[in-house]
Amino acid sequence: MNSNINDRTMALAGTLQAIAQVQHLARHGETDRSQLAATLKSIIITDPQNITEVYPEQALLQQGYNMIVDQLGDTKQKDVEITRYLIGILALERKLSRSNNALGMLAERISQVHRQLHHFDIADEQVISNFASIYSDVISDLGPKIQITGNPNILQRPLVQHKIRALLLAAMRSAVLWRQLGGKRRQLVFTRKNIVETAKKNITLQ
């Protein structure tokens, strides 16, 4: 795929969109089903010709774009928890990119889920459970585990745990795409104004 700042910003918005759902789920125990489905669909698009194949429903990325503005812009809306999750995801993605074994396992497991979707909806509990298992088996042990904070009673629910791991896998998928498009952590510091302006343009286009 051709790389440009708009595409990289879209992938970063996808990463933050997934992270935001993790945070909301950990606090409230539920998440919007259409948002969840759209986010999970990004995982199974593994060989896109362009970025819009990964994020076909642009309107559902609005929260991600707004979070870019809040987190990287000159505002007081920064969320330390979101920042911690993002740093954790980007660190795990770097580990993943250097492990051919993990990448091979990841591709095989995702293809298994892809076949499962002939029989189940992507937001079905069984599919979510399989996504969660992929995260636990392939991603989680690559580096320090991401500690999720929220309501302890909610976090004890198995379905909530599965959804959180599935969404973390989706965040990883967007982080992988971000790196493939030329994204680097130092850009979040040195070119953040350009990223923020690009995010703002995508918000106003809706």
Image (cartoon, rainbow, N blue to C red):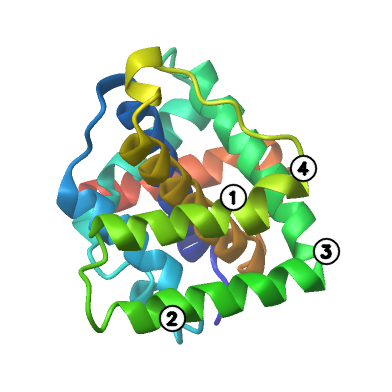
Depicted 196 relative to depicted 38: above or below: above
Instruction: Locate residue 60, reporting x and y percent.
Output: 23, 53
Query: In this orientation, does residue 100 appear?
Result: yes
Circle 2 Cα neighbour tier, 10 Å, few/some/many (<14 / 14–19 / ≥20): few
Give the residue at x 31% y 31%.
Answer: 25
**Rendered image: mark on residue 136:** 1
Please tell me which of labels 3 and 4 falls first in the chain: 3
Circle 1 Cα neighbour tier, 10 Å, few/some/many (<14 / 14–19 / ≥20): some
Comparing labels 3 and 1, the label whose residue is closer to the camera = 1
- Mark 3–mark 2 Cα distance, whole angstroms, equals 24 Å
Give the residue at x 54% y 73%.
Answer: 109
Please tell me which of labels 3 and 2 falls first in the chain: 2
Comparing labels 1 and 4, the label whose residue is closer to the camera = 1
Residue receiving disc 2: 50
Residue receiving disc 4: 143
Comparing labels 2 and 1, the label whose residue is closer to the camera = 1
Which amino acid does the dot numbered 1 rest on?
Ser
Depicted 88 relative to depicted 180: above or below: above
Residue 72 in the figure: left or right of residue 121: right
Instruction: Locate residue 184, reporting x and y percent.
Output: 71, 52
Disc 2 + disc 1, Cβ < 8 Å? no
> Who is closer to the viewer here, 161 or 25?
161
